[in-house]
């Protein structure tokens, strides 16, 4: 008598063979593939484990939950008509899968933090968390119903233990517990709970319990491939379409400086750089009316390890007339070579009044960005220009709350002479203090980042540049303004 062909056997042939009292038991891996209950519960328990694991390296904190949720979806799909509890588990898993996968796709765009802070998304997050606990209750009820159907005394305490485990873990997260011993104990308990659930599912096999999987129109393999294509394609579209700010670019008005000729001539005579002056708005030129003196500082900076220095930063200080000593500070940047713009750029400003008690703010932050294309100059306001209060984490200083000025923007992929500036006025409070204004420019060097982060978010995070997607260049014009001189310190 020849051996049975286990590999090509379907469920009906398998059951008929068992009824015929086969003397040779089939291999364990074949039993798992042919027996729907064992395969479904194996997927569910593996999925629960993967969606609960947090490994913050190699993107495993995103990959493992994505795989785990797909396994849970396939597992509960096969059992959805076994009883109402497992049917509810399937419905909850569908919602949680949509929520998880939509979040993973949204993470590939720069809008993730903005959307996640909205009341609707916050409500969905709370609902998703609540449904996680409801799903465990339904799993407990589903296992008990299956045990009764198989003629076994209902006992599914391990499902309740898993529910309690999730509750304690959530409480520790809320309390920001930072110890090591308790998390290790929780990890051991988690492994024991999953082991108990797996033994529970094997009891049903030993009791001879069998199910017929719910009919499906799409095979499991096709569902898994479809989920993969959805995630990969969605993230690609996110990187492609959601990586830049929407900028209001308009062709510059050739007559925008009309009526400013006298002030411009006066500034040029005092030494104001002509290329910087041409980029200013009429309002910022008018703010320099009656200028007493101009001091200028120019530096070229590299943005990688090459010898090229494509970023030119010019600091200009204009002393203004008045009873109190006042200065208008300009920070101008110009890319002398196209560095490639892959997403967002940001300027973090530490103005004189921010760092020194000798100066105070005398007006609002202003500025704009520009570029040239086909002989035409285009201008746009910054996507964001203003003050932000944020909390950052530093390995040296710990958690710190700061309030800084920011200018956030995106540049188009085609063009030349990409440039822009920010400006602000200050007034003297007391003598003897240095004029110290820090200009921190963060450039995005690559589109390959996940989850996507804006340059401004990177600056506020307090993260170190390293070899990541962002590079920050610092420039700090500094001088002692006296009646005799006001030269920038080199």
Image (tube, rainbow, N blue to C red):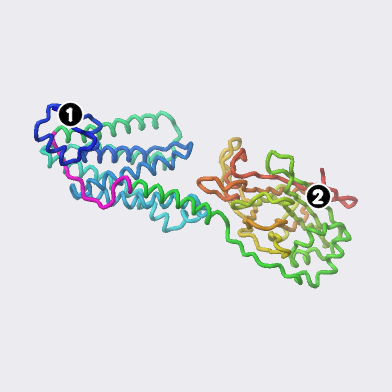
**On residue 3, which mark appears?**
1
Which residue is painted at 16% across and 37% down in the image? 14
Q: Which mark is residue 480?
A: none
Is residue 218 inside the magenta stretch? yes
Q: Quadrant of the C terminus?
A: top right
User: What residue is shown at x 76% (from left), y 72% (from top)?
Assistant: 255
The reply, left or right, for residue 224 in relation to residue 420 is left
Q: Is residue 470 magenta?
A: no
Place of residue 219 in the rendered image (x, y in percent of width and height, measured from the top left)? 28, 48
Using the image, determine if residue 45 lies above or below residue 373: above
First along the sequence among labels 2 and 1: 1
- List x then y, in percent, for residue 33: 24, 37
State which region is magenta. 207-222
Observer-side mark, 2 or 1, equals 1
Image quadrant holding the N terminus, namely top left
* Mark 1 Cα-neighbour bin, 10 Å: few <14, some 14–19, many ≥20: few
Residue 451, given in percent of the width and then of the height, sits at: 50, 46
Farthest right residue?
Answer: 484
Viewer-closest of 392 and 124: 124
> In the image, is 419 to the left or to the right of 195?
right
Q: Residue at x 77, y 52 (%)?
A: 314
Helix, strand or loop under label 1: loop
Q: Is residue 119 above or below residue 224?
A: below
Magenta segment main secondary structure = loop
Q: Nearer the viewer, residue 269 or 211?
A: 211
How many numbered marks appear? 2
Residue at horizontal 47 percent and vertical 37 percent from the top: 56
Residue bearing mark 2: 297
Q: Secondary structure at mark 2?
A: strand
Residue ranking furthest to the left: 20
Residue 268 visible (yes or no): yes
């Amino acid at each position: 008598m020849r051996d049975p062909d286990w590999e090509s056997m379907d469920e009906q042939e398998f059951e008929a063979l068992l009824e015929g009292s086969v003397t040779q038991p089939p291999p364990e891996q074949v039993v798992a593939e042919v027996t729907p209950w064992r395969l479904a519960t194996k997927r569910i328990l593996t999925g629960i484990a993967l969606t609960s694991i947090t490994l913050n390296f190699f993107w495993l904190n995103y990959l493992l939950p994505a795989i785990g949720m797909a396994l849970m979806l396939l597992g509960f799909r096969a059992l959805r008509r076994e009883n109402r509890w497992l049917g509810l588990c399937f419905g909850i898993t569908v919602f949680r899968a949509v929520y998880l996968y939509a979040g993973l796709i949204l993470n590939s765009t720069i809008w993730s933090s903005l959307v996640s802070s909205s009341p609707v998304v916050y409500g969905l997050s709370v609902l998703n968390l609540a449904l996680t606990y409801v799903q465990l209750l339904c799993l407990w009820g589903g296992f008990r119903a299956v045990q009764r159907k198989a003629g076994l005394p209902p006992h599914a305490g391990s499902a309740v233990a898993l529910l309690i485990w999730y509750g304690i873990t959530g409480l520790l997260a809320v309390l920001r517990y930072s110890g090591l011993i308790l998390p290790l104990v929780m990890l051991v308990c988690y492994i024991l709970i999953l082991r108990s659930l797996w033994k529970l599912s094997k009891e049903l096999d030993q009791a001879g319990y069998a199910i017929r999987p719910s009919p499906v129109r799409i095979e499991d393999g096709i569902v898994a491939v479809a989920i993969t294509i959805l995630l990969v394609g969605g993230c690609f579209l996110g990187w492609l379409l959601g990586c830049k700010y929407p900028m209001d670019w308009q062709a510059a008005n050739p007559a925008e400086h009309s009526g400013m000729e006298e002030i411009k001539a006066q500034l040029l005579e005092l030494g104001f750089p002509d290329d910087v002056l041409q980029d200013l708005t009429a309002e910022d030129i008018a703010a320099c009316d009656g200028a007493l003196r101009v001091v200028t500082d120019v530096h070229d900076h590299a943005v990688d390890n090459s010898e090229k220095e494509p970023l030119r930063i010019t600091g200009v200080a204009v002393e203004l007339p008045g009873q109190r000593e006042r200065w208008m500070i300009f920070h101008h940047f110009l890319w002398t070579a196209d560095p490639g713009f892959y997403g967002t750029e940001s300027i973090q400003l530490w103005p004189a009044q921010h760092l020194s008690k000798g100066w105070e703010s005398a007006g609002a932050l202003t500025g704009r960005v520009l570029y040239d294309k086909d002989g035409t100059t285009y201008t746009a306001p910054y996507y964001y220009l203003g003050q932000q209060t944020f909390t950052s984490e530093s390995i040296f200083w710990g958690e710190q709350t700061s309030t800084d000025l920011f200018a956030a923007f995106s540049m188009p992929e085609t063009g030349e002479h990409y440039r822009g500036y920010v400006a602000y006025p200050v007034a003297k409070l007391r003598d003897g203090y240095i004029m110290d204004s820090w200009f921190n420019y963060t450039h995005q060097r690559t589109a390959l980042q996940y989850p996507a982060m804006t340059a401004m978010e990177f600056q506020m995070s307090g993260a170190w540049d390293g070899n990541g997607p962002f590079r920050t260049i610092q420039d700090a014009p500094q001088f002692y303004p006296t009646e005799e001189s006001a030269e920038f310190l080199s």
